Image (cartoon, rainbow, N blue to C red):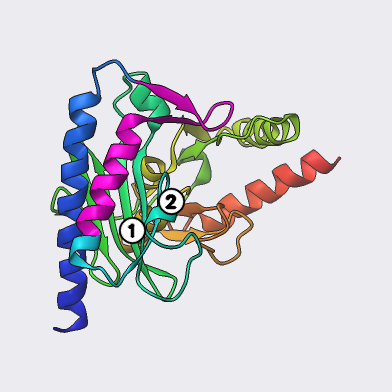
């Protein structure tokens, strides 16, 4: 089997897993949820756990030699450290807060890294039935239709999608708020999201960014660290834009940082 064939098989199995998990999410969307707190604002439900079990069992059945990193139960299936081996990185219900409150922007996010490089990505919103897929070097698709990054070249006319995260200590909240205020004063249009996987698709448009990263890149977007440096999948920091806007956006963030230091 050639590399392209194996990658296509990886994608097909990941889609199967995402759609099966999507059924669980869809069935539980309007039901009463049992909610636990992993932190002050970071939530987990029985649906998160059921979806992760289903996804990992499905993937492990087909690819038992692969490694697995998950949001809820990674210790039960392998490693929490990213290695060069083929590794599935899964957020079984990205957007748990949205799910709990009946807001339809939730998704299953599945990514495969090979030698630490995001190679296969699936992001599936079962509520509005949007399936984003991508294989490194083979393009990105929404429900089977090829998608491309925006060609917008003026930052003020672009739409910035962001997420605040779950940390609520005073330093983090103040720093995040000040950055957003700085960007708003530049009259940048902004939309805030609770979760990241949908967010990065809207940008092409981790916890887990493996799935979203390959899809965004295959759509023609640049995925990078907000500092402007190369994207590091383990850093929990990510930004994405088209090629025209990257430097403009990074410069705007640097100005915001300088403003915070004054």
Residue 68, position as x, y percentages in the image = 37, 61
The answer to whether residue 146 of the structure is visible from this angle is no
Q: Disc 1 designates what residue?
A: 111
Residue 208 is labelled as 2
For mark 1, give the secondary structure.
strand
* CB-based contact (under 8 Å), mark 1 and mark 2: yes
Task: Give the residue at the far top of this rendering.
Answer: 32
Q: Nearer the viewer, residue 252 or 161?
A: 161
Q: Is residue 52 left or right of residue 254?
A: left
Please state the horizontal and vertical placement of residue 185, each as a whole percent of the image. 64, 31
171 lies left or right of 54: right
Q: Is residue 242 magenta?
A: no
The image shows residue 91, relative to residue 14, as above or below, that is above
The magenta span reads 34-59
Residue at x 49%, y 33% (from the top left corner): 189
Q: Can residue 90 be seen?
A: yes
Residue occupying the far bottom of the picture: 2
Query: Is residue 262 positioned above or below 1 on the image?
Result: above
Q: Position of residue 62 (x, y in %)?
A: 18, 65
């Amino acid at each position: 089997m050639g590399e392209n064939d194996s990658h296509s098989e990886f994608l097909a199995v990941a889609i199967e897993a995402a759609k099966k998990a999507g059924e669980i999410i869809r069935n539980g969307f309007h039901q009463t949820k049992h909610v636990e707190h992993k932190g002050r604002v970071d939530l987990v439900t029985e649906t998160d756990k059921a979806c992760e079990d289903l996804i990992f069992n499905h993937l492990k059945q087909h690819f038992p030699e692969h490694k697995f990193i998950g949001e809820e139960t990674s210790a039960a299936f392998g490693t929490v450290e990213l290695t060069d081996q083929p590794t599935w990185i899964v957020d079984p219900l990205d957007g748990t807060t949205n799910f709990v409150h009946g807001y339809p922007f939730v998704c299953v996010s599945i990514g495969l890294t090979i030698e630490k490089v995001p190679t296969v990505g699936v992001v599936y919103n079962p509520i509005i039935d949007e399936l984003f897929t991508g294989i490194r070097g083979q393009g990105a698709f929404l429900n089977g239709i090829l998608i491309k990054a925006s060609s917008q070249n003026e930052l003020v006319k672009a739409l910035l999608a962001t997420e605040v995260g779950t940390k609520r200590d005073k330093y983090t909240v103040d720093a995040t708020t000040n950055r957003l205020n700085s960007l708003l004063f530049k009259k940048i249009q902004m939309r805030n999201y609770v979760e990241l996987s949908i967010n990065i698709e809207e940008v092409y448009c981790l916890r887990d960014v493996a799935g979203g990263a390959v899809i965004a890149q295959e759509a023609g977007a640049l995925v990078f660290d907000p500092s402007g440096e190369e994207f590091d999948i383990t850093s929990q920091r990510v930004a994405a834009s088209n090629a025209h806007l990257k430097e403009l956006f990074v410069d705007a963030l640097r100005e915001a940082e300088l403003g915070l230091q004054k």
